[in-house]
Image (cartoon, rainbow, N blue to C red):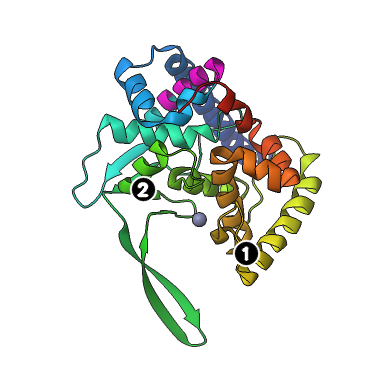
Amino acid sequence: MIYCLLSIPLLILFYWFYRDKRTLQKQQQRRAELRAQPFSAAYSQILEDDFPLYSRLPDELQQTLKQHIQIFLDEKEIVGRDGFVITDQVRVLIAAQACVLILKRPGNYYPGFQSILVYPDTYQADSTRTDGMLHITDTSTRAGESWHRGPIVLAWSHVIQGARDSRDGRNVVMHEFAHKLDEENAAMDGLPMLPTAAQYKAWSEVLNAEFKVQQQKWAEGVDDVIDTYGATSPAEFFAVVTETFFEKPHPLENHHPKLYEQFKQCYLVDPKQWSKNRVD
Ligand SMILES: [Zn+2]
């Protein structure tokens, strides 16, 4: 009798393991099918017209990005808010900018959430903070946000501006999806999952030192290639440097070579090489 009772949890564990394995197999099969499908000519035209960073990519990475876009659009749900209509242009430009971050990173397509909510323009959002016994609600105007284990929210006016100007160091889609990479290992603390265990020590040393420098510059009102918003917290520093890394790689490497090297190893790409390919 006791053996029968003991075997029940084992059976449940076996069932869960088997079910997860089957789900993973189906997902891998679906992704392989999507990668093999031809990329829509209309989608290519959108990338050519509205996303100059795409045109700078080497051919091999252009192909990888297209495959990522097909999988991303199959797995994520993009929903309009305040009457905003989701078109192919909206879908492709959000997917493309999000997938630049995972061009070469091993792993998944932003697991743990499914929905991306899109407002036509900046929107008002409430946040609550506690001060002693008081709960205070502040309202602020936002261009985007990433809810922990929840949806990403974006303002289309900033999404399209970020896509069309890939040299200004500002990109709301990259910023919010960098937060999603950051939270893959639980806390959103500026420490994403790195490709190898050996990288964590150097990452922590360089990022901590550079974050302190950024805070000092912010306090003294000194400009830097990294936007001052990066001094807000380690999580914001990671997201802001991600925007700078992909959009201003040369100045970032010139002024912060150690930081650039860490981001190169984190994303497994070298965006300063891309500018050699085509002119935008
Ligand atoms: Zn942020």
Quarter placement of the C terminus: top left
**Disc 2 marks which amino acid?**
His
Which residue is under mark 1? 222
Residue 144 drawn above or below residue 279 = below
**Nearer-the-camera pick, 133 or 188:** 188
Residue 41 placed where, x, y %? 32, 15
**Left or right placement of residue 107 versus residue 121 in this view:** right
Quarter placement of the N terminus: top right
Residue 278 placed where, x, y %? 51, 22
**Magenta part of the chain:** 58-70
**Nearer-the-camera pick, 156 or 132:** 156
Q: Of tags 2 and 1, which is closer to the observer?
A: 1
Q: Mark 1 packing: few (<14 Cα in 10 Å), some, or many (20+)?
A: few
Magenta span contains residue 63: yes
- Main secondary structure found in the magenta portion: helix
Q: Mark 2 packing: few (<14 Cα in 10 Å), some, or many (20+)?
A: some
Residue 153 drawn above or below residue 77 = below
**Disc 1 marks which amino acid?**
Val
Residue 158 badge: 2
Residue 197 placed where, x, y %? 77, 39
Mark before the other along the chain sequence, 2 or 1 = 2
**Nearer-the-camera pick, 45 or 85:** 45
Residue 255 drawn above or below residue 104 = below
Q: Residue at the spot x=60%, y=60% of the render?
A: 223
